[in-house]
């Protein structure tokens, strides 16, 4: 049996401009298990002129289902808005995400400050829980009216400084459906888990790493640093497992990481392999399967969408009639007369997507194929 394999080569990252329909709407919970490229092609986004003029820089979206609540920064202010997903009215129509006019939040904020919005079971309520850095080692837990923007109750969280010069540079959530806490990351190896509830903060756990490192990303049990190092949580501490790059890592998961200067890192077992996907500074990512092969979808800091295929895949396997019985090759006798057979693609490097196998029963011997 002769196998003909046609392979699409990996190329440069494909970019789609954001314009005034920024790709940050892809953070909506409706698209959490969907290819972002398909969501962009199949969704109309209804934005107000106010949001277009504000040009959101950083966005956090919370809430499951059709309604997500977005908090975004623009200059030295934070704003809140609702983003409502609606299904297509007819099969040929697109889905719609309608983003309401934003409400300015009455709290002290600097454009350089990280912030985080806690997810919660009662996401349709008028209450938002927002954590903002207010000092080098201080966080303020704000309970806010989303409709009015007023702060109902602030609560200051002061973290313990283990060495001089430590400073919070990033705040991330637990990664659960509903946050029960958050992580404060920063200089001097700062890696702190802050336990919270809806009334404020409860306690702090110290998981600091090497004091020479600035921790910039955390997700699914891994941290990434400014220097390009990766640490894994082993039960009671974070230990270094790889240094695949010298560029800053901005987001990380158990599958890989992304960062500045086109940085894409793919994890295969214990190996973390660096790729260069253009020059953009990436902040969000998800791995997927594309026509070109294994790929990663990316959102950069300007809210542009990119697709980068990093590994080739077989897109078609054509089979021709064997001229000799195959018992010496496959052990199943003549393939054409066997009741069942198995084809195995040996892929130790995980380059191939899972193929679709089709047996054509009514063709001639020359076009019977598996595709």
Image (cartoon, rainbow, N blue to C red):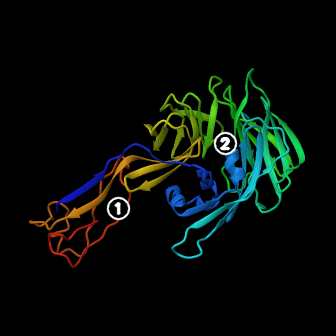
Along the line of sight, which residue is nearer the eye, 353 or 109?
109
Label 1 element class? loop
CB under 8 Å between discs 1 and 2: no
**CA distance separating discs 1 and 2:** 40 Å
Taking the image as shown, residue 235 lies to the left or right of residue 316, namely right
For mark 1, what is the residue?
355
Dot 2: within a 10 Å radius of its alpha carbon, few (fewer than 14), some, or many (20 or more) residues?
some
Seen as rendered, the residue at the extreme top is 164
Q: Position of residue 265 (x, y in %)?
A: 48, 40
Q: Is residue 238 above or below residue 284?
A: above
Along the line of sight, which residue is nearer the eye, 171 or 267?
171
Residue 193, image quadrant: top right
Dot 1: within a 10 Å radius of its alpha carbon, few (fewer than 14), some, or many (20 or more) residues?
some
Which numbered dot is residue 86? none
Residue 188, image quadrant: top right
Q: Is residue 141 above or below residue 289?
A: above
Q: Position of residue 25 (x, y in %)?
A: 62, 55
The answer to which of marks 1 and 2 sits earlier in the sequence is 2
Give the quadrant of the N terminus.
Answer: bottom left
Q: Position of residue 112 (x, y in %)?
A: 72, 33
Along the line of sight, which residue is nearer the eye, 41 or 338?
41
Q: Is residue 320 above or below residue 52?
A: below
Taking the image as shown, residue 335 lies to the left or right of residue 200, namely left
Q: Residue at x 78, y 27 (%)?
A: 161
Q: Is residue 156 above or below residue 62?
A: above
Seen as rendered, the residue at the extreme right is 152
Give the quadrant of the C terminus.
Answer: bottom left
Q: Position of residue 280 (x, y in %)?
A: 51, 38
For mark 2, what is the residue?
57
Label 2 element class? loop
Seen as rendered, the residue at the extreme left is 323
Q: Residue at x 53, y 41 (%)?
A: 257
């Amino acid at each position: 049996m002769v196998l003909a394999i046609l392979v699409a080569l990996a190329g440069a990252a494909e970019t789609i401009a954001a314009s005034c329909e920024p790709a940050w709407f892809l953070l909506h919970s409706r698209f959490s298990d969907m290819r972002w490229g398909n969501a962009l092609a199949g969704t109309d986004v209804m934005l107000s002129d106010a949001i277009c003029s504000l040009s959101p820089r950083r966005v956090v979206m919370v809430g499951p289902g059709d309604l997500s609540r977005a908090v975004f920064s623009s200059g030295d202010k934070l704003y809140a808005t609702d983003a409502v997903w609606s299904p297509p009215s007819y099969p040929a129509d697109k889905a719609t995400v309608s983003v309401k006019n934003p409400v300015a939040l009455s709290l002290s904020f600097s454009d350089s400050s990280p912030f985080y919005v806690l997810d919660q079971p009662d996401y349709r309520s008028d209450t938002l829980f927002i954590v903002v850095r207010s000092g080098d080692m201080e966080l303020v837990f704000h309970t806010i009216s989303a409709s009015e923007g007023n702060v109902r109750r602030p609560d200051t969280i002061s973290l313990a400084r283990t060495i001089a010069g430590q400073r919070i540079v990033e705040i991330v959530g637990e990664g659960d459906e509903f946050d029960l806490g958050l992580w404060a990351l920063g200089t001097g190896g700062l890696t702190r888990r802050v336990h919270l509830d809806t009334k404020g903060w409860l306690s702090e756990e110290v998981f600091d790493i090497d004091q020479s490192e600035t921790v910039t990303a955390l997700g699914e049990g891994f941290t990434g640093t400014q220097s390009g190092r990766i640490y894994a949580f082993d039960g009671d501490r974070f230990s270094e497992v790889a240094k695949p790059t010298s560029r800053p890592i901005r987001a990380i998961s158990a599958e890989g990481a992304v960062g500045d200067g086109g940085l894409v890192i793919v994890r295969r077992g214990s190996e973390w392999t660096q790729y260069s996907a253009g020059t953009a500074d990436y902040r969000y990512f998800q791995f997927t399967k594309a026509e070109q092969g294994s790929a990663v979808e990316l959102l950069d800091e300007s809210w542009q969408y990119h697709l980068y295929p990093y590994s080739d895949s077989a897109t078609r396997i054509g089979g021709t009639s064997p001229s000799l019985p195959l018992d010496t090759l496959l052990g199943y006798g003549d393939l054409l007369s066997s009741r069942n057979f198995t084809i195995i693609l040996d892929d130790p490097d995980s380059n191939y997507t899972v193929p679709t196998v089709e047996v054509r029963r009514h063709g001639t011997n020359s076009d019977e194929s598996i595709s």
